[in-house]
């Protein structure tokens, strides 16, 4: 039985949920620093300030701990990106300015240490965990693309961008952002300077506006 499942009529206690979250956060810290193979459950327990047996009682074994850690971290990254995209719900009259703010925030999140570590761990462990790409992408780029497509559809309905396929437009916008940064960050292994983040976000928005906006 997983840590988030309980017998009928019972729900996990708040303390148990909080302790599980602390373990997952500690696990990501250690996995990010040492990689999967070099990390031990004891190191994670020490980082979380809990007993080793407590880690096992919440997350069964190292493999499940890694999978759950990656999924939980991807969820947190997604939540922050969705908050950025939500600014497009009411963009006002200056669509370019709002798109530039949204694009810059998304790239800032993409280039922060947590997101870079998430990508690095995903790429490095995909042979051992072949479902990891689906787990991480499903909680990040896929759901983010769906949210962005929804906002683009709304912009199309209000006449701020031309009629288009919202899903395709969202995919293209994300490609304009993520493609250059993935190259510049060397798949998450290099920190991208602030001026490069600004340059990439500006160029992505400029290209998108030229392609889709009814008024540039």
Image (cartoon, grey):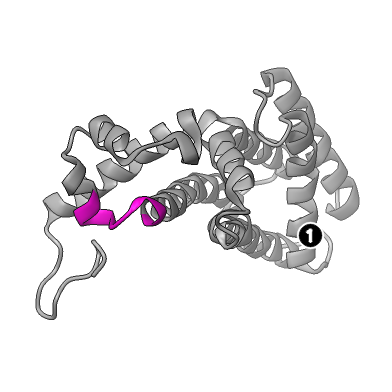
Q: Is residue 107 left or right of residue 81?
A: right
Q: Position of residue 26 (x, y in %)?
A: 33, 36
Q: Is residue 63 magenta?
A: yes
Residue at image coords 51%, 50%: 78
Q: Quadrant of the C terminus?
A: top right
Residue at image coords 73%, 42%: 178
Q: Is residue 200 left or right of residue 144?
A: right
Q: Is residue 86 left or right of residue 63?
A: right
In the picture of the structure, the residue carrying the numbered disc 1 is 169
Q: Position of residue 108 (x, y in %)?
A: 60, 32
Q: Position of residue 23 (x, y in %)?
A: 28, 43
Report the magenta residues as a range.
56-64
The front one of 194 and 185 is 185
Look at the image and tell me whether residue 216 can be seen. no
- Main secondary structure found in the magenta portion: helix
- Direction bottom: furthest residue: 8
């Amino acid at each position: 039985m997983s840590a988030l499942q309980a017998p009928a009529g019972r729900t996990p206690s708040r303390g148990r949920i909080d302790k599980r979250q602390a373990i997952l956060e500690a696990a990501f810290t250690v996995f990010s620093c040492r990689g999967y193979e070099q990390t031990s459950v004891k190191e994670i327990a020490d980082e979380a300030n809990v007993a080793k047996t407590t880690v096992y009682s919440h997350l069964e074994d190292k493999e499940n701990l890694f999978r759950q850690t990656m999924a939980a971290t991807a969820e947190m990254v997604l939540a922050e990106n969705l908050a950025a995209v939500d600014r497009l719900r009411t963009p006002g009259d200056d669509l370019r300015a709002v798109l530039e703010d949204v694009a810059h925030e998304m790239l800032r999140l993409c280039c922060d240490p947590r997101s870079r570590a998430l990508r690095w761990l995903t790429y490095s462990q995909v042979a051992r965990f072949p479902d990891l790409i689906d787990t991480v992408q499903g909680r990040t780029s896929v759901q983010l693309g769906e949210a962005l497509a929804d906002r683009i559809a709304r912009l199309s309905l209000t006449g701020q961008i031309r009629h288009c396929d919202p899903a395709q437009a969202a995919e293209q916008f994300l490609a304009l952002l993520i493609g250059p940064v993935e190259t510049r960050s060397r798949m998450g292994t290099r920190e991208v300077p602030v001026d490069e983040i600004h340059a990439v976000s500006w160029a992505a928005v400029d290209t998108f506006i030229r392609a889709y906006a009814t008024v540039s």
